[in-house]
Amino acid sequence: MNKKWWKEAVIYHIYPRSFRDSNGDGIGDLQGIIEKLDYIQSLGVDIIWLGPVYASPNDDNGYDVSDYYQIHDDFGTLEEWERLKDDIHRRGMKIMMDIVLNHTSDEHAWFEASRLSRDNPYRDYYHWHEGKEGREPNNWGSVFSGSAWEQDPKTGDYYLHLFSRKQPDLNWGNPKVREAMYSMMRYWLDKGVDGFRLDAVNLLCKPDGLPDSPLAAADSEFAPCGPLVANGEGIHGIFQEMNREVFSPAQTFTIAEMANVTAEEGLLYTASDRLEFNSIIGFEHMDVDNGPNGRWETIPFDLVALKRILNSWQTALNGRGWFGLYLNNHDQPRVVSRWGNDVAYWKESATMFATCLHMMQGTLFIYQGEEIGMTNMKFADITQYRDIETLNYYRHETAMGRPQEQVMADIYTKSRDNARTPMQWNTEPHAGFSSSEPWIGVNPNFTDINVEAQEDDPASILNYYRLLVQLRKRHDVIVYGDFTPLLEDHPAIYAYQRTLCGEKLFVVANFTAEEQKLTAVKAPENAKLLLANYEKADGEPDELVLRPYEARVYLAGTA
């Protein structure tokens, strides 16, 4: 089985700004997390992934770092971070930091020096280029709308920013940049960090000559460049060097966030003999409802397409690489609203998605609020949104003449702020998140959906998640078993089987609001019901009628 502790781990993902505010300024902080560690521990999780808490102007909520060695004042002090780390370790859990390597803030000391002159020693820390015929060096578009280039008035040159204009891309072809970033990671490892989640890390190598993107642009003169930049030439050499210099000496757990990666490419990054990363967070399955023009163009959810993608990752990496399992995080709208039914079948669809995911192979992620079924949020006005990607999209689309109600409909569906509303702790003002007005509005359904309401309810989503984590720790077949997809072309049912050392795990899930009769496949002989998200789950496993958003797990072959 090639057992590893991190393969068996469950990770709780905290977005610090929205988790818990301890000092009443409306912004979540480190002390707030410390106060909720008993709750996090009660979930049975092994690792806490802490979103960026470094010094930052917060143009992109901390993913624009101005000083990797300092804690942002909003979150607290380095001493409070030390206390958080120690308290996490004292409870037998580990801490994983979010590391941003592709870019810094434009307020980082390196960039401020680099823009002073063309011969400044830090100029080559970034991608500075002359314009082309009075325009940008090429047609690359930013992920956050508009050009990926910004002209600086000091020298007239342009610098590259794949994301916000306040997030200039680092030049990883410069060995001084690489060593400086390795030193920074060693600093945090020396402080007791157990692992890293590496942000947008497969974008580090830009193509030679900076060719124009051949992709068609939607209503813009700038074209998407992500597929052109992702997985660039030389990227594996950099990651192997990074592993040699930083990860292997400290035996660090690493999970790399990578867009534009297939399962076959994911294996190259995570195969144990290649010595790059332990695991990968992909986007392919989360893009299943994206249209040809990207994430803001939503097409109907296609279960067959989702199964094809997830199944490919399960089979391609089995025994060779490793995958990060998630359906919710700080960059994605809440899945219970996105692909489920957050009204008539709120509890059923939330627990169905969790069951289907938790029974797969990979390191499991739980994003704050997912475990209580938090839903998407429809703010009444664009001024209530805080996410730079959302605000840029609104400005661009309305400037192009699209009706405001159409643009807002896109935002209601896909805005990252759906996942960033404050954690809903109880029915007190501001959901118990803060004693004052939060930095972003609380979802008004907090009076019904909150931790306190679910804590002592054995049938709650929260306690269902606790049971899922317990089962994952109890049965090796869930973590290490081989994966066999079933009913791959069925438009409504996700079914698969896991096998290990004579044990067989049979999983079926109904992704619709209609009953589905299961006759084409059946559970293994002598299988017993291990888990169901409906209270009464009677009936023979060889002829099931699955109710709306029902999920069942059967286990056979145990002693």
Image (cartoon, rainbow, N blue to C red):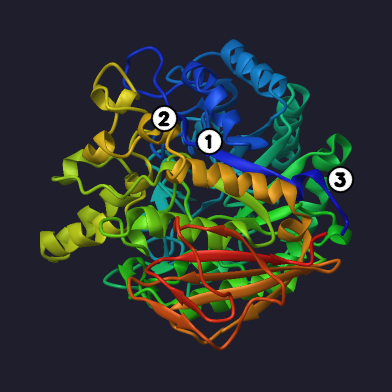
Label whose residue precedes the other's in the sequence (1 or 3): 1
Q: Which residue is mark 2?
A: 17
Q: Counting other residues with Cα less than 10 Å from the Cα at mark 1, is it few (<14), some (14-19), or many (20 or more)?
A: many
Separation of marks 1 and 3 at Cα, in angstroms:
25 Å
Q: Position of residue 362 (x, y in %)?
A: 68, 57
Is 290 displayed left or right of 315 in the figure?
left
Q: Counting other residues with Cα less than 10 Å from the Cα at mark 3, is it few (<14), some (14-19), or many (20 or more)?
A: some
Is residue 411 something one can see in this rendering? yes
Q: Position of residue 302 (x, y in %)?
A: 41, 77
Looking at the image, which residue is at 49% across and 39% down?
63
Residue type at numbered disc 2: Arg
Q: Position of residue 97 (x, y in %)?
A: 63, 34
Looking at the image, which residue is at 50% across and 17% down?
35
The answer to whether the residues at label 2 and label 3 have Cβ atoms under 8 Å apart is: no
Looking at the image, which residue is at 74% across and 24% down?
192
Is disc 1 placed on a helix, strand or loop? loop
Residue type at numbered disc 3: Arg
Residue type at numbered disc 1: Gly
Label whose residue precedes the other's in the sequence (2 or 1): 2
Is residue 146 something one can see in this rendering? no
Query: In this picture, is 288 found above or below 387?
Result: below
Mark whose residue sits in front, 1 or 3: 1
Separation of marks 2 and 1 at Cα, in angstroms:
9 Å
Quarter of the rendering occupied by the N terminus: bottom right
The answer to whether the residues at label 2 and label 1 have Cβ atoms under 8 Å apart is: yes
Q: Which residue is mark 3?
A: 244
